[in-house]
Image (tube, rainbow, N blue to C red):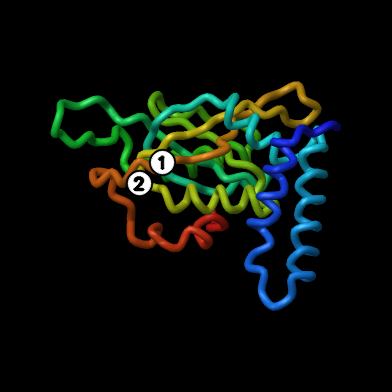
């Protein structure tokens, strides 16, 4: 992999930034810059590196805005189940009222879990949908599920991709990023659900 001077300069500047202050020993600082330069170069030279893949996923994702209505774990996959609904359009200055309140969404989740346990399909009502997070047995996926839990009752931009599962013959919708657009006051979330996101990410269904 041949790098031009501009790329090399960017690598060096990034390594310098990551090395922190020079401190008492210039030699120690230079060693940190050298290590950082090598690591960054190795990452850039790896066509399969996870950071480039993350950028590509966001570039290629489909975006939509919806109300995060409920987040619960899917124990069979360790993914988070994120239930969402699009708020109805209202006039300027009016507050939109969600079609489904929290308790109704929770009831549909419980019915979905019960149907799955019996080997049956469950159809969510029109206007209420579900999307999965990444697997939560990896830190990155866990953090995303935790963020989703903290966004229950908020409008958010969803960045969605279709991810192959199993032998690749089936795709599932997976959210890769949320952008918070603020709380929806008309969607009342019980106090016991408004707990730290870290705890909510692993809450029992």
Taking 6 as reference, is 103 above or below it?
below
Query: x, y (%) of residue 133?
Result: 58, 41
Quarter holding the N terminus is top right
Q: Is residue 187 visible?
A: yes
Q: Which mark is residue 172?
A: none
**Residue located at (24% from left, 46% from top):** 185
Query: x, y (%) of residue 182?
Result: 32, 45
Residue 54, by quadrant, is top right
Residue 48, by quadrant, is top right
**Residue located at (48% from left, 27% from top):** 63
Query: x, y (%) of residue 200?
Result: 50, 57
> Label 2 belongs to which residue?
153
The reply, left or right, for residue 106 in relation to residue 17 is left
Residues marked 1 and 2 touching at CB (< 8 Å): yes
> Label 1 belongs to which residue?
68
Please name whichever residue, 76 or 4, is drawn nearer the observer in this view of the structure: 4
The reply, left or right, for residue 158 in relation to residue 135 is left
Q: Secondary structure at mark 1?
A: strand
Q: CA distance from mark 1 to mark 2?
A: 6 Å
Please name whichever residue, 48 or 98, is drawn nearer the observer in this view of the structure: 48
């Amino acid at each position: 992999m041949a790098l031009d001077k501009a790329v090399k300069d960017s690598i060096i500047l990034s390594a310098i930034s990551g090395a922190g202050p020079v401190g008492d020993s210039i030699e120690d600082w230079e060693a940190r810059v050298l290590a950082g330069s090598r690591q960054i170069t190795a990452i850039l030279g790896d066509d399969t590196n996870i950071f480039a893949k993350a950028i590509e996923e966001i570039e290629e994702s489909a975006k939509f805005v919806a109300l995060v209505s409920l987040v619960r774990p899917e124990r069979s996959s360790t993914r988070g189940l994120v239930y969402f609904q699009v708020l109805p359009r209202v006039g300027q200055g009016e507050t939109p009222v969600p079609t489904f309140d929290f308790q109704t969404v929770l009831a549909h989740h419980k019915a979905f879990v019960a149907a799955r346990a019996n080997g049956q399909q469950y159809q969510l009502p029109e206007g209420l949908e579900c999307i999965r997070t990444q697997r939560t047995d990896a830190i990155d996926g866990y953090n995303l599920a935790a963020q989703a839990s903290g966004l229950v009752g908020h409008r958010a931009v969803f960045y969605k991709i279709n991810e192959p599962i199993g032998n690749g013959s089936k795709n599932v919708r997976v959210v890769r990023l949320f952008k918070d657009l603020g709380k929806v006051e008309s969607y009342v979330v019980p106090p016991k659900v408004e707990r730290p996101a870290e705890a909510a990410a692993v809450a029992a269904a």
